[in-house]
Image: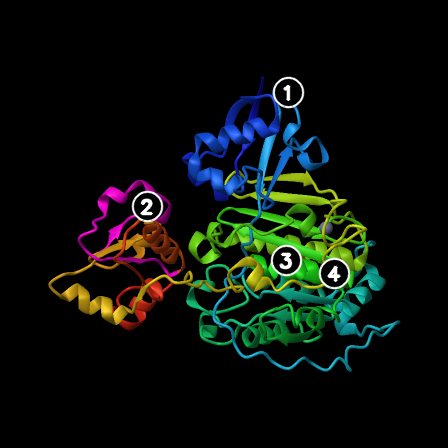
Amino acid sequence: MAEVTVKVPAPLRSFLDGRTEVRLAGATIGGVVHQLAEAHPALRKRLLGPEGRLRNSVALYLNDEDVRNLQRDETPLKDGDVVSIVAAVAGGSVGGSPRRARAPRSRANSTKTGAATMGPEELRRYSRHILLPEVGLAGQNKLRQGKVLLVGAGGLGAPAALYLAAAGVGELGLVDFDSVDPSNLQRQVLYTTSDVGRPKLTAARARLEALNPGVRVVPHEARLSSENALEILEPYDIVVDGTDNFPTRYLINDACVLLGKPTVYGSIYRFEGQVSVFDARRGPCYRCLYPEPPPPDLVPSCAEAGVLGVLPGLIGILQATETLKLILGIGEPLVGRLLLYDALSLSFRELKLRKNPHCVLCSSHPTQTTLIDYPAFCGVPAGTEREGPGVPEIEPEELARALEGSHPPFVIDVREPKEWEMGHLRQAHLIPKDELPQRLDELTHAREVVLYCRSGHRSAASTRLLLDLGFTNVRNLKGGINAWAERIDPSLPQY
Ligand SMILES: [Zn+2]
């Protein structure tokens, strides 16, 4: 038996009383992971699939090596080893309702000129670049000819776009379909208070062109899908992934592998971020790391999880750094390396990523050669939260009437305590979603039970759970507390 330290990623810490690491004794990696899963049943389904095997959405590292490159579950342990659980994290910009897609732009004006000349104004603007021997006039011309697509103009895309525009990258494409919401302003530094309600791309374009009129900003007001992804990505040299959801993340990865382009990957969760460069021509792709997305009901969106506002700033700027290095062809890109950042301990860690010789997408014998229909594959459409199938629902107006009646329903708020503090229904009882299975004795079969969360997705899963446990009179509040705030009680905040 060896004494080892198991490092726990932020999304799983709530199941271990907030601990960042645990000390365990075991002979093999598999033994230690099963020991952890058995000791914490709520953790079990996040680590292990139905057959008791490690989920594909979880990567395990022994020290800085992926155990898939060692002896997998059978990898032996020795005293002092560090086992890292690295969970797939989607965080980035926060999605919203889709807007009408715009027709693809004409590519007639996107010519590449060879020996571009620079006037005195440009020489002055870029002088601090030109002074660098690694950049110089030739490098600045490469930047001017560079074409970068940012998918997501949110927390990660905002700082990345600002710095890439300032640096003089010639063409910046932006993919987003959202409008500026007041809750974006805490971190999405492209936007100002007066932009609230405007389409993000309109506001972003004005801001970036004001910063640098020499940059061509190309808006793609669309939701990336298996139908449009190849067409939108094709004209660009590099794709910066600033999305917040797994369907779009896999779509970007798969399209980039098929088109032979690098993806500059970034993701955030609460206080932690990840950065890497996936370029299947010379290293692994995202699917080599996580062959499949985690089940949708186990993934908190950024809107539910919260994020320290400065975190996407740092991660987005690291993505911009890697993008500039790729265009300039300088330095060591983060190919084959996953950088992990923890803001609370202010520490960076780096893990090796290897190309998976059996990757369904980027190996020498791929079994996936087209884009998958991701919304169906991942269970929820990108950027949206949807009620589960067949869960009975109640409209806010009907609930308001029922609460005034002689047999008011028992109302359960399944959100987290911090969300409850921002505001809740007066008659509600707080039972967070993950605690519900242990607190069934607080419920009654005698009254109707109505559950709600922020937008109706989490509470739909809880409604399904109660129905499966034999409760018959259970309904989900349609649209969650946001719909209630909009239609019944405007004193409550929408978020
Ligand atoms: Zn791969």
Residue 305 % position (x, y): 44, 52
Is residue 66 something one can see in this rendering? Answer: no
Q: Give the position of the N terminus as an image quadrant.
A: top right
Amino acid under label 3?
Tyr
> Mark 4 — residue?
369
Taking the view exactly as shown, the residue that stands out farthest to the left is 406
> Mark 2 — residue?
436
Residue 494 % position (x, y): 35, 65
Q: What stretch is highlighted in magenta?
A: 428-456
- Based on the picture, tell me whether residue 152 belongs to the magenta stretch: no
Mark count: 4
Earlier in the chain: of badge 3 and badge 4, it is: 3
Earlier in the chain: of badge 1 and badge 2, it is: 1
Earlier in the chain: of badge 1 and badge 4, it is: 1
Amino acid under label 1?
Lys
Q: Do the residues labelled 1 and 3 touch (CB within 8 Å)?
A: no
Residue 423 % position (x, y): 28, 58
Q: Do the residues labelled 1 and 4 touch (CB within 8 Å)?
A: no
> Mark 1 — residue?
78
In which quadrant of the rendered view does residue 304 lie?
bottom left
